[in-house]
Image (tube, rainbow, N blue to C red):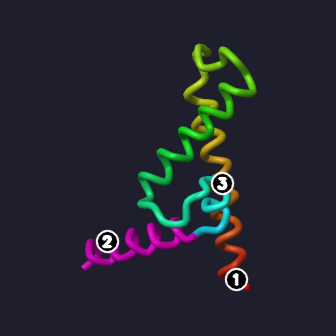
Amino acid sequence: MLEKSNKTDKKEIKKQTAKSPYMSEVSGIERMSFHDLEAKLENQVIAQLKEEFPGIEHSKSFGLLVDAVVNNIKNKDLAISEKREIN
């Protein structure tokens, strides 16, 4: 019973993420699967960091920086989504 509920929750989360205005604005794409959207966002973050800080991709902590930026974007998106649900 719980397993079926989790599958439903995951589908709902995917739908909400794909429709999220912040993620759409950041990625420029309206509907994508969660994993596709996350991969595209990560690629955009990497490209932007490389553009702004040439050579940074050779840093030992580059992966952690990318993860932190992606996490911050996702947290902002979540906060906006929660705020919309309350209103």
Q: Amino acid at mark 2?
A: Lys
Residue sitting at x 51%, y 46%? 40
User: Which residue is the site of mark 2?
Assistant: 7
User: Which residue is the site of mark 3?
Assistant: 26
Residue sitting at x 73%, y 85%? 87
Using a 10 Å C-alpha cutoff, classify the residue at mark 2 as few (fewer than 14 neighbours), some (14 to 19) or many (20 or more). few
- Disc 3 is placed on an element classified as helix
Q: Quadrant of residue 79?
A: bottom right
- Disc 1 is placed on an element classified as helix
Residue sitting at x 67%, y 48%? 72
Give the Cα separation between the discs numbered 1 and 2: 24 Å
Q: Which residues are magenta?
A: 1-19
Q: Look at the magenta stretch and give its main secondary structure.
A: helix
State the count of labels.
3
Residue 84 horizontal/vertical position (percent): 69, 78
Residue 3 is a magenta residue: yes
Q: Please give left or right for residue 86 compared with residue 23 in the image.
A: right
User: Which residue is the site of mark 1?
Assistant: 86
Mark 2 near mark 3, Cβ–Cβ under 8 Å? no
Using a 10 Å C-alpha cutoff, classify the residue at mark 3 as few (fewer than 14 neighbours), some (14 to 19) or many (20 or more). few
Q: Amino acid at mark 3?
A: Val
